[in-house]
Image (cartoon, rainbow, N blue to C red):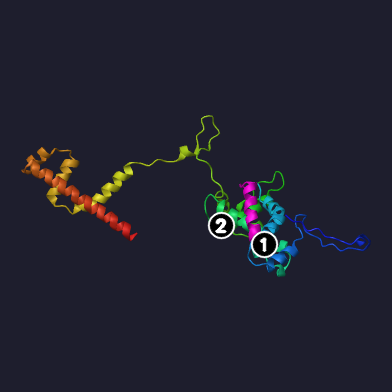
């Protein structure tokens, strides 16, 4: 990487020199190189100069990334995001519009904030709710900065932020949406403590039976009375086909055919209704 070194005449120290103050030590003087890159057409020379500028300003991008440490993301990943923002800033910067740092800092900062907004939430919530969360989080920090200060109430936070109590409640709920607990996390401090997974319910197989019965009701209503009676005797009174045949005065083979035909009709009607509901939903 080339470094610009200002040259001066032998007697330069004897003359008063005016220096332009820079906000940070990691803001190199690259105005001439940006002006040169703006004049170059696309090609290897321009790409090399672009890479040189990115490298020169990379310490500043790392400094900005450091502001967001300890928020649940590794510093190395934050530096990668900030470097991406720096590349965008170098590509879009117009030297005619002022100093590069004034343009790059908000660009890089915005890229890091966008990373937290879009990638770091365990549960995706609307941007408005994310903003409420940030306001509530900062207000709680301000109101509890002195040791021994009690946890602020919803009314205290609302008065401090100018939000309504309903908005504060929404922001407080969103505080728990940024990260999630593992299902193996213990929810009891006892020796025989149980995990969060132990509090979850299990699927009840009886639900399927209820759904099947409700699905078959309509089809059963459409059957002739004799066929409904046969199904009732077979499946609810647990009668054999021979006993049903004796009671009705018909052959066992006829009972078997009626049972098969009735069950198929009820099944086809239930499945057809379910498919129709799926298409219309």
Residue furthest to the bottom: 96
Front position in the image: 66 or 267? 66
Residue corresponding to mark 1: 45
Q: Is residue 52 magenta?
A: no
- Farthest residue toward the front? 44
Query: Dot 1, how many residues are within 10 Å of its Cα: few (below 14), some (14-19), or many (20+)?
Result: few
Identify the disc placed on residue 146. Answer: none
Q: Dominant secondary structure of the magenta stretch?
A: helix
* Magenta-colored stretch includes residue 80: yes
Task: Name the residue: 13% across, 51% down.
Answer: 225
Residue under numbered circle 2: 129
**Residue 59: x and y, percent?**
71, 53
Part of the protein shown in magenta? 71-89
Residue at 56% in and 47% down: 179
Question: Looking at the image, is mark 2 or mark 1 nearer the viewer?
Answer: 1
Q: Nearer the viewer, residue 77 or 139?
A: 77
| Residue 156 showing in the rendered view | no
Residue 192 horizontal/vertical position (percent): 51, 30
Residue 85, image x, y percentages: 64, 58
Horizontal side of 148 relative to 129 (left or right) equals right
- The quadrant of the rendering that contains the C terminus is bottom left
Q: Foreground residue, 201 or 50? A: 50
Number of residue marks: 2
Give the alpha-carbon distance from disc 2 to disc 1, as whole Å.
Answer: 47 Å
């Amino acid at each position: 990487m080339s470094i610009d070194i200002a040259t001066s005449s032998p007697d330069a120290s004897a003359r008063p020199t005016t220096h332009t103050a820079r906000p940070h030590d990691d803001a190199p003087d690259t105005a001439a190189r940006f002006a040169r890159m703006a004049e170059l057409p696309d090609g290897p020379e321009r790409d090399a100069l672009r890479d040189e500028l990115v490298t020169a300003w990379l310490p500043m991008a790392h400094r900005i990334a450091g502001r967001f440490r300890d928020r649940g993301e590794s510093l190395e990943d934050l530096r990668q995001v900030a470097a991406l923002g720096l590349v965008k800033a170098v590509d879009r910067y117009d030297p005619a519009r002022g100093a590069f740092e004034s343009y790059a800092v908000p660009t890089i900062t915005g890229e890091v904030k966008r990373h937290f907004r879009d990638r770091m939430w365990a549960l995706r919530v609307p941007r408005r709710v994310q903003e409420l969360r940030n306001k509530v989080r900062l207000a709680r920090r301000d109101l509890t900065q002195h040791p021994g200060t009690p946890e602020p109430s919803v009314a205290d936070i609302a008065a401090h932020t100018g939000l309504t109590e309903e908005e504060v409640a929404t922001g407080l709920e969103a505080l728990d949406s940024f990260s999630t607990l593992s299902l193996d996390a213990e929810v009891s401090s006892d020796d025989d403590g149980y995990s969060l997974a132990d509090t979850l319910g299990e699927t009840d197989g009886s639900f399927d039976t209820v759904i099947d019965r409700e699905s078959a009701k309509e089809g059963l209503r459409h059957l002739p009375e004799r066929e409904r009676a046969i199904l009732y005797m077979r499946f609810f009174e647990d009668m054999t086909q021979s006993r049903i045949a004796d009671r009705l005065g018909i052959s066992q083979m006829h009972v078997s055919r009626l049972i098969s035909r009735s069950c198929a009709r009820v099944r086809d009607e239930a499945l057809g209704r379910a498919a129709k509901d799926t298409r219309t939903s």
